[in-house]
Amino acid sequence: MGDCAAHYNLFAGGRTIRLESVQNANDQAATAAMSIIGNPTPYRSLPWFWSNQFNLKLQTVGLSIGHDEVLIRGDPHVRSFTLGYLRNGVLIAVDCVNAVKDYVQAKSLIQNGALVDQLRFSDPMTPLKELGSANHLTTTRTIKLV
């Protein structure tokens, strides 16, 4: 387990991947602990990352693996924008640059497998939380520790 372990990841389209991040290592440890105490819980943690680079706050939530469309929201020229990654119309990830509100609001949309209206997503005046959600992520898988 941890950031060096290959694992089934629902947010990677069901692929087996390595996700090298502190967040993933912590979340997998929590999943393992639940199994140890007799309460096995499927590993279904939404990946997220962040970095501060001088005056830029970079934040990512979800995984863009397998996306078939990219939407832009905001203006890269003013150094505040969001890239939304879709697969079959479902929001699977966002990369945010100085767009903290988008990052926070996109988390639940991605977690719930939300279908998004492309025009509304691209309009920075429309809060992402108003785009609604439809749960398309119904597959879970319990990780068994041996």
Image: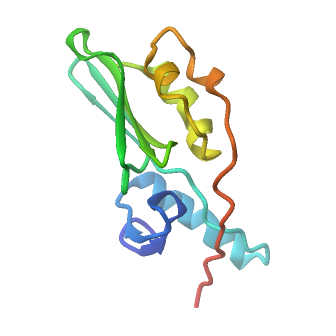
Question: Front-most of 43 and 35?
Answer: 43
* Colouring mode (rainbow / by chain / secondary structure / one colour): rainbow
The answer to which image quadrant residue 30 occupies is bottom right
Residue 45, how many percent across, how many down?
57, 55
Q: Which quadrant of the figure contains the C terminus?
A: bottom right
When the figure is inspected, residue 46 is found, relative to residue 33, above or below; the finding is above
Total labels drawn: 0
Residue 78, how many percent across, how many down?
25, 8
Question: Front-most of 130 and 8?
Answer: 130
Residue 56, how many percent across, how many down?
26, 21
Residue 49 in the figure: left or right of residue 56: right
Residue 47 in the figure: left or right of residue 115: left
The answer to which image quadrant residue 40 occupies is bottom right
When the figure is inspected, residue 119 is found, relative to residue 115, above or below; the finding is above
Question: Front-most of 97 and 117?
Answer: 117
The residue at the point 54 percent across, 32 percent down is 106
When the figure is inspected, residue 67 is found, relative to residue 108, above or below; the finding is below
Q: Determine the residue located farthest toward the bottom in the rendered image.
A: 146
The residue at the point 56 percent across, 23 percent down is 128
The residue at the point 47 percent across, 52 percent down is 23
Residue 35, how many percent across, how many down?
70, 76
